[in-house]
Image: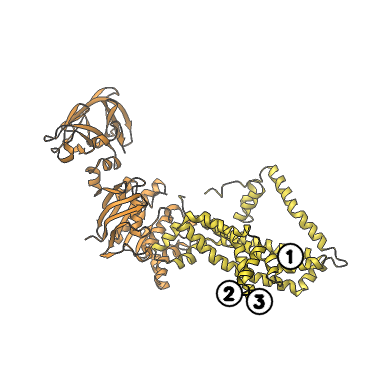
Chain colours: A orange, B yellow
Amino acid sequence: MGFLELSGIQKRFGDTVAVEDFNLSADRGEFVSFLGPSGCGKTTTLRMIAGFEQPTAGSIVVDGKEITRRPPNQRNVGMVFQAYALFPNMTVADNIGFGLKVRKRPAAAVRQRVDELLDLIGLPGRGSRYPYQLSGGQQQRVALARALAIEPQVLLLDEPLSALDAKIRVALRKEIRSIQRQLGITTVYVTHDQEEALSLSDRVVVMSDGRIEQIGTPAEIYNFPATSFVASFVGTLNLLPAQVVDAGAGRLAVYGQEIQAAKPLTGGLTNGQVSIALRPESMELGEGGGSNRLRGPLEDVSFLGSIVRMRVGLGDGASVSLDTFNDPHLTLPAVGEDVTVSFPREACLVLEGGTTAEPVDALAV
Amino acid sequence: MSTGAQAPFGPLGVMRSWLRAGPGSGARRRGFGPPWAWIIFLLGALYFLVPLWATFLHSIKTKPDPFLAYRQVFADPKFLGGLGYSFVVGVLTIVISLLIIVPTAYWVRLKVPRLRPVVEFVTLMPFVVPPVVLAFGLIRIYGGGSPITLASTDVGLNLLLVGAYTILSFPYMYRAVDTGLAAIDVRTLTEAAQSLGSGWTRILWRVIFPNLRTALLSGAFLTMAIVIGEYTIAQILARNEAFGPYLSLLGRSQPYQPAAVSLISFALTWLAMGAIAFLGRGARQRVQVAGAR
């Protein structure tokens, strides 16, 4: 049994199902991210752990104790909000010490803990300032310190970096992870930013329409997406409709060009129409990339700094994109010239639901 | 936030930036706005000040001592007695009104926002029900023969007066508090406090009340102004020691003193407004809850 257990969680608002059949078991000290688009139910799930929403069904257990019906102020769960939510009438020190004062800790112990946390978040000596005197990044660090002050069993972070600019976001992301590792606190992090989720987490829960699409390590989520939604939501990839030619041999046809999957197609994949997901970085221009080949005219070349992205037409207005590392001596065919794209069988991920696949010319991000 | 960077627009902008930044700041030097704004402002100021000036001139017509009316007013124990009585009633009214309105407005915003129009309507009732009706209604309900008889004793009548004024204060107090609540992220602050282990009483007392300081002061001073000047209810409830009935009696019996009293009470009101602006200055700046900076 995990340290944080969510079993059969369901949340309905009237007729609308916000979260359905949510099951998660997180270990002590694990960093789990809920990743998904707006309205997928990730924040609702987080709020149910915090106690701000009551599940319609299911149970929440922390360290073996059921807390499903406990009010939020009796859960010992720390929360960091997107909007910081620092108390504007209190100084930084009073904000951080608020939870300890609620717990009636002696003043000296509160002061000591506040100083420790100010050091931990890199803001020593700023205790007498008011929140409005701090930058956004500093305010969010104080919010983190305030949540950590009470030594919560579980730390919840609800899109804590989304109000910050890109540079501060990346810096603070590293700090959050470093502090979390240092303290070994079980953490649930909600974000719609895949880069954030993949770089921070031990495991990622990808959600869509109130349901879990996949739970896995960042590498599993990226390399082996379980559904076309995960494949399209996480990372950059090509989603192409394909026709099953021989399920047993794993043979498929993509716009009339035959390719082969790594394994025989089974279950729902044996039906006529499927989707294949190909990461741009797993393909090569020319014939040296693997046994699978697609041919077509080079339609576009984009320089993206460290990589060069090429788009190759497959007919019917569809195309496939592939990346190669930038190199000062890189020579590329001219736009319009017919080229061959190759990739290994393992790079070709076959997914169900070919009819609902993204348009073939779309590079889903 | 763009407040500090904007040039003050017209006389109100100049005043606002002066109040915000304090005297001696650079905001005053940035610009004074277009002339037409100043013309409108001056016309408005004249409309407001000329009657005051006329009242003042009338109040110093006594001879040979032009300030005799003021001296008489301050020497009259009924003046300070009436003012003191109304002040105490006003303070009680403010306390009761705050205890009713703040938790109500907070709860409505937090838990049942769809009921906000209903509560707004209810708090507007004092504008619909005339004070005469309210006062007679109270006498009828709490008079002889009722299970709770308040209208037959002095203490009871004082309680009824405070109760009636509390109802009269609702439209002003609710609006002030509701506007204050709109300026802070009530839900998130509440949830933050809850997640730190805080119960409702502490949330209201330590988080919500302090962040509503300006709003509460506005509501409180408006209430005080109403209580100090109110006549009808105090008269019907036979509270002749209140300031309103005293002022009315004075107007019927003395030529110059009512003008002096009016100006004195007006000056007190302005002092109260100045206090709101002064006390609320820091709070306005602090209530910047979120946003990238």
Residue B62: percent from left, percent from top: 85, 65
Q: Which residue is mark 1?
A: B264
Residue B165 lies in quadrant: bottom right
Above or below for A211 versus A87: above
Name the disc covering residue B154, or none.
3
Q: Of label 2 and label 3, which has the lower sequence position?
A: 2
Mark 2 surroundings within 10 Å by alpha-carbon count, few (fewer than 14), some (14 through 19), many (20 or more) = few
Using the image, name the chain to which the residue with label 1 belongs.
Answer: B
At label 3, the amino acid type is Asp
| Residue occupying the point 49% across, 62% down | B208
Residue A174 in view, yes or no: no
Q: CA distance from mark 1 to mark 2?
A: 39 Å
| Residue occupying the point 46% across, 51% down | B291
Residue B175: percent from left, percent from top: 57, 57
Residue B255 lies in quadrant: bottom right
Above or below for A355 versus B110: above
Taking the image as shown, residue B143 lies to the left or right of residue A159, namely: right
Share a chain, discs 2 and 3? yes
Residue B227 in view, yes or no: yes
Q: Of label 1 and label 3, which has the lower sequence position?
A: 3
At label 2, the amino acid type is Ile
| Residue occupying the point 72% across, 49% down | B44
Secondary structure at badge 2 equals loop
Share a chain, discs 1 and 3? yes
Q: CA distance from mark 2 to mark 3?
A: 14 Å
Q: Kindly report which numbered mark, 1 or 3, lies closer to the viewer in this rendering.
A: 3
Secondary structure at badge 1 equals helix
Taking the image as shown, residue A262 lies to the left or right of residue B96, namely: left
